[in-house]
Amino acid sequence: MLPFCLYFVAGLITAFHVYTLVALAAYGVPINPLEFLSLLGSLSLVTAAYISLFKPYAAARIALVACLVMWSFYAPAIVRSLHAFAK
Amino acid sequence: MIVPYLAIALLLVATGYSAIVSFRSTEGKARSWTFPDRAGRPARILVGVFTLIFLTGAGLWLLTSIRTSTRPSSRLLIPDGYTGWVRIGFEVKGTSSLPMEGNEYIVKIPVEGKLQTSSPEQYGWARDKYYYYSAEGVHPLDDSGPAQLIWGKINGEESGATGERKYEEFFVGTEQQFKDQGNEEHKARDR
């Protein structure tokens, strides 16, 4: 159950976070295409959570790819935030 | 806000865990709660029930939020030929409330572009309509598309001597006029 809980909660929280960023488009904030990629990663992570109940190792590989896809959004965002904080 | 930090922390843990499971050798190693084999029947039933409850809850929440996120639309009447910022102050004591026609608020902006009303600010989704008015009648203003004349709509709150004041602002004019006034504001700030 640990992989299910971990992948499911991580997929849900990251999806909610990125959704709040995408929703800002309603106020004129430009959308970053990487946000959609990250949402796709979150969906894959939730899918991996269900697969983990039957095939834990296949699910782990799917989850790893999903996480790497999500990092393509999160890593530059973290670097930019740290850069802005340092300034 | 805790969500971004929580998302990053969970993503870190999920990446690390999935990488370890993906690359670790399973030969001769006993199953444990940290690296379990496929889930048993009771666990799968539990997850099925949980998913059903989760989806029902999410559906109900979505329906409720759709119902509560709409508001009556507003018909904003702007003096014919007016260009510049329009400001509407809400919940101002001693002023009149906004009249309603059908299910629409009528917001008639005076010639100076500032209106104060005792009505509260409305939140939620609605399609507001903008018009120029004159003695001859009204004609609609585009708030989107190539002939857009409404820009930079903001809703804000500021503190004053009389307490918190809620307001709405937007610019009326062409895109060039909107950009020009923005540049002038920057120049004035730099001086």
Image (cartoon, coloured by chain):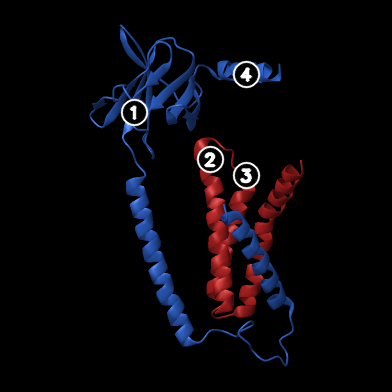
Chain colours: A red, B blue
Give the chain letter at badge 1. Answer: B
Could you say where residue B179 lies in the image, as x and y percent from the top left?
60, 20
Q: Dot 2 surroundings within 10 Å: few (below 14), some, or many (20 or more)?
A: few
| Foreground tag (4 vs 2) | 4
Residue projecting furthest to the left: B102
Q: Do discs 1 and 3 belong to a common subunit?
A: no
Disc 2 from disc 1: Cα separation: 22 Å
For the image, the number of numbered tags is 4
Regarding mark 4 in the picture, which secondary structure is present there? helix
Amino acid at pointer 3: Asn
Q: Nearer the viewer, residue A79 or B135?
A: A79
Q: Which mark is residue A25?
A: 2
Q: Dot 1: what SS?
A: strand
Q: Earlier in the sequence, mark 4 or mark 1?
A: 1
Q: CA distance from mark 1 to mark 3?
A: 31 Å
Neighbours of disc 4 within 10 Å: few (<14), some (14-19), many (20+): few
Q: Amino acid at mark 4?
A: Glu
Query: x, y (%) of residue B158?
Result: 49, 31
The residue under label 1 is B74
**Chain that bears disc 2:** A
Residue type, mark 1 in image: Ser
Badge 3 element:
loop
Report whether residue B176 is seen.
yes
Residue occupying image coordinates x 73% and y 90%? B27
Q: Where residue A32 is drawn, which disc sits there? A: 3
User: Where does label 4 land, which residue?
Assistant: B185
Q: For mark 1, does the 10 Å Cα neighbourhood hold few (<14), some (14 to 19), or many (20 or more) residues? A: many
